Each structure stands twice: as structure tokens, then as C-alpha cells.
Amino acid sequence: MTVLRHVCDSIGPASRAHAEAARAAVAHAGSPMLERLAAALGGAQHTPRPRGALKKIVVAAGDHGAGDPGIAMGNDHPTAIAARAIADGTGALAQIARAAAAPIVLVDAGAREPLPELAIRLGRGPTADVLAGPAMTVVDASIALEAGIALSVSLIEPGLDVLALGAIGVGSELSAAALLAAVTDVELDGDPGFPAAIARGREVRASAPLDRLAELGGPETAVLAGLILGAASTNVPVILDSYATGAAALAASAFAPAVTGYLVAAHRGTLVHPAILAHLGLVSIFDVGLGHGEGTGAAMLLPLIDQVAALAAAG
């Protein structure tokens, strides 16, 4: 795990001074929401003039054994359906991304059924049932983490100002609950599987971050956590969507606590996500009733980033 250690060691704190300067640069607009966003971006980018022209959206697909329907569904699998809507441009995310001039990168981190050909295949298949035992092996989790880091390098090298994240896959809400329960005593409602997921999380609370990720996470969790770490190491802010991306942020912050300074919560989300944001110390930019978070909520923030960049440049 030399690569992981090197990346984590490269992540310093976000800049409080630049965050305040960026907030002040847009204060003339009279919008507290834009001020919060400017501060988050400026602190992460270490500049008083946040940038937003170069942006990408990464959507990672990963299925969890806890959500396995027990039969092969082929093209009718929910993950495959969501991936096709992204790939063929008919989904809400694809439409918002086009308007925001943000290319979408679709990643097969571990989907159960085949995804469209354009998906980048990084995974080794779906996880086992987290409620019954370890979701992944440590080797699988390590490979996925490093794949996410490598992907971040390939995306950032040509130039990148902002990285927005989304995720698709069944069973991720239980994995997110387990990962949260591994680091906090929060109680959760909203899903009949949460009590068992919380119990699993508490079983491995004393484990090292990589072991917890392997025990409780999903393939997309690990890939997205690697993306977050890689982006933070190069001062690129990361926009979170809902609980699947929040779970990845939990995993990344366990490896490098300073990574939280590079995270921007697009919206409050549902189920586990509000508790994840509270644990990470993040306040969402807006509050809408979006659920799973295939990236739509994160993409909705991108036009506001363009506004912040324009206001800061003129301020």
C-alpha cells in the first residue's frame, strides 16, 4: 500500500485563510449559500478566486450482496438500467451534466450485471452480504482503492478544477450505515436492515481503516474513496451527492482526516446521509429531497460553482 500511504501523506489541511478570502470575494452578491460554496472551494483549491471551468462527474457502479435479488436480472437489474440511462443520455444526470458542460465518467467498480461498453471496468465483481460477514477481502479493497487513486490521476493530469461524484448500485444504504456505525454511536431509522448493519459496524469498530473498508464497504465505496484521496492530494475539491458517496468520504477520512477540508456536500440527502455529513462536519449547500444519489444532486451544484467563479473573479 505504498501508493496509498504516499497519497495520504500528501494531503494537508485546506486553507482557512483562502476560504475566508473566497467568501469575502463573493459577499457582494448577498447570498449566504454562494458564500458557503465559495469558502469550501477556495479553501480546497488554496486560492481566494475559486475556479470551476474544468469539471467532471464520476459515477461508480457497485452492487452489494445485502441487496442481491437472488436471481439473474440481466438488463433489467436496477444498476444496469441506471447505467444505460447515463450512457445513452436520457437520464436526468446526463441532461444536467450537458447543461453544465461536465463530462460523465461511468465506472464499473463491481456491478452484478454487464454495464454499457463505455464504462471503465475497475472492479472485481459485487460484494458478499455485509450483514452475514465480510463484504470484501482486504486485497479487493486495496485494489479498488488504488484503482480509484489511479483514475484520479488520469482525470486531474489534463487539468481539473472540480470533481463531482455519484454512485449507483443496490444495497449501498446498508453498507453506508455499517461504515457510519463503525465510527459513531448514531442510531438510524428508515430501513429494516439498519439494526443489523449497525451491529456489524460496531463489531469492527476497533479495526484499522483498510480492514473496516473491506469488512463493510462496497466496490464503489473503495474506488470513490481512492478518487477522493487522489483529488484532495492535488487540491481538487470533491462534490458529494448522497449516502453512497458519503460512505466513500467516511472511508477516505479514516485514512486521511484532513480530506474533509476538500469535500463539499451538495445536498442533505436521505437515510444515512444526514448523519454522515454531521459526523464529517459538513453542511450541505442546499436541501432537496433527493435519494440514492447517482450524481444528479452533485451535478446540480455545478452551475452554482460557475456563478461563484464569476463573482470571485469580478469581486
Image (tube, rainbow, N blue to C red):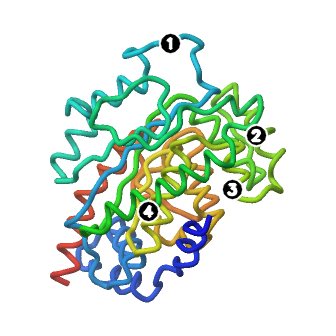
Q: Quadrant of the C terminus?
A: bottom left
Give the Cα separation between the discs numbered 4 and 1: 37 Å
Which part of the image, by quadrant, shows the N terminus?
Answer: bottom right
Distance Cα–Cα, label 1 vs label 3: 31 Å
- Which of the two discs, 2 and 1, labels the residue nearer the N terminus? 1
* Tag of residue 72: 1
Q: Front-most of 121 and 283?
A: 121
Whether residue 197 sits left or right of residue 250 in the image: it is right
* Residue position marked by numbered label 2 in the rendering: 198
* First in residue order: circle 1 vs circle 3: 1
Q: Earlier in the sequence, mark 4 or mark 1?
A: 1
Indicate which label's residue lies in the foreground, 3 or 2.
3
Q: CA distance from mark 3 to mark 4?
A: 24 Å
Q: What amino acid does circle 3 point to?
A: Leu
Taking the spot 76% from the left edge, 40% from the top edge, the residue there is: 198
The image quadrant that residue 199 belongs to is: top right
Contact, mark 1 vs mark 3 (Cβ under 8 Å): no
Q: Specify few, some or many for label 1: CA neighbours under 10 Å numbering under 14, 14-19, or 20 or more.
A: few
Q: Which residue is mark 4?
A: 264
Residue with the mark numbered 3: 210
Q: State the separation of the CA atoms marked 2 and 1.
A: 28 Å
- Is residue 89 depicted above or below 70 in this figure? below
Q: Position of residue 79 (x, y in %)?
A: 42, 27
The residue that appears at 57% across and 36% down in the rendered structure is 172
Name the front one of labels 4 and 1.
1
Q: Identify the residue shown where x is 35% and y is 60%.
A: 163
Quadrant of the image occupied by residue 193: top right
**Camera-nearest residue between 85 and 283:** 85
Inspect the image, locate mark 1, and give the three-letter code of the amino acid beneath it: Ala
